[in-house]
Amino acid sequence: MHVLHNKSVTASFHEFILLGFLCSQEIEILLFVLFSIIYILTLLGNSAIICAVWWDQQLHTPMYILLANFSFLEICYINSNVPSMLFNFLSKTKTISYHGCILQFYIFLSLCATELFFLALMAFDRYVAICRPLHYPTIMTRKVCGTLVSASWVGGFLWLVTPAALISQVPFCSSNVIDHYLCDLGAMLAISCVPVPKTALTCSTFSAVITFITLFYILVSYTLVLRAVVQVPKGSSRRKAFSTCSSHLIVVFLFYGSVTVMYVSPGVASQPGRQKFLTMLYSIATPLLNPLIYSLRNKEMKVALKKIMCKL
């Protein structure tokens, strides 16, 4: 184990060692192949959605514009952690610089926060479309949609400024070995020289506030949406609305469930194996599944993708 003695992080600490999955070299090669395939499929699936919305004029509506931006977010999200994980599978040193680790922590969790805002924004779009259909064209204009998308990105990155600043002040003077495959909150706090309860509490509070506020808004929105859908006479419109809402709710519960257990519930920080599994669930599995759940089940999206394939 690589250990640094009797010096503070600000004096001589230059890098961390990411332990990853603690398995044999043969297993690491298998994992490298597996996650490489997942990574490529995620990029292809989300890129296909962006291209379909970009090229098909019929998809230039707020709902599909939001889906395209969401897919772009997923590409950024998976790029914030998977390439470094793949590199570490083949690396003998498995090191990351101190500043690189802090930067990865900030970008990774900022994208996570941005995704929470995006899921709430997409719930708002469905609420207006189904519960206020006559006012939808005047409420969800392209200008309003662009403003809300920009606010989600800015809000997500501003939300993590304070936690990132606090983490950068944590002293790491006894060990530079992180039992994780990325620089995540619990794994970094676990190797602090001294207990930092205020930092841990502040970071948990920031995570809990954004998680529960956006989740509460999403649940209220979809409750109103489903109530409105039930009142619609049986037919294709009702089935389409149910299909859209159920797809969105699958994504919401998958993402929020893992994030809540990871950053809000106590005790997870002391369980590295559980940490890694939950992190993979919301940072690798959901970007892969979202194109299938959100868009590729959609009839209009399928038609647009077929048109693109025919052109190619």
Image (cartoon, helix red, strand yellow):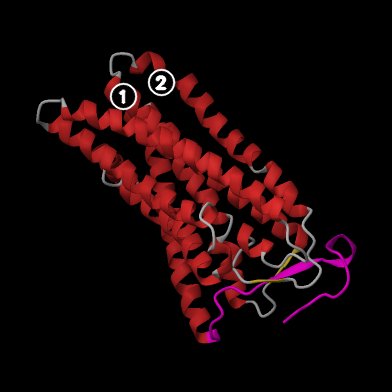
Q: In the shown orientation, is residue 228 left or right of residue 152? A: left
Q: Which residue is mark 1?
A: 129
Give SS at disc 2: loop
Residue 4 inside the magenta-drawn segment: yes
Q: Residue at x 58, y 75 (%)?
A: 89
Q: CA distance from mark 1 to mark 2?
A: 9 Å
Label total for image: 2
Q: Which residue is mark 2?
A: 140
Q: Nearer the viewer, residue 276 or 295?
A: 276
Residue 308 seen from this side: no
Residue 55 inside the magenta-drawn segment: no
Counting from the top left corner in percent of width and height, residue 65 is at 42, 32
Q: In the shown orientation, is residue 143 left or right of residue 83? A: left
Three-letter amino acid code of the residue under disc 1? Ala
The span shown in magenta is 1-25
Question: Mark 1, residues whose alpha carbon is within 10 Å: few (<14), some, or many (≥20)?
Answer: many
Q: Residue at x 47, y 37 (%)?
A: 214
Three-letter amino acid code of the residue under disc 2? Met
Residue 102 seen from this side: yes
Counting from the top left corner in percent of width and height, residue 38 is at 43, 63
Magenta span main SS? loop
Q: Residue at x 57, y 46 (%)?
A: 207
Q: Residue at x 17, y 30 (%)?
A: 230
In the image, residue 223 above or below residue 282: above
N-terminal of the pair, mark 1 or mark 2, is 1
Is disc 1 in contact with disc 2, using a CB cutoff of under 8 Å?
A: yes
In the image, residue 230 above or below residue 23: above
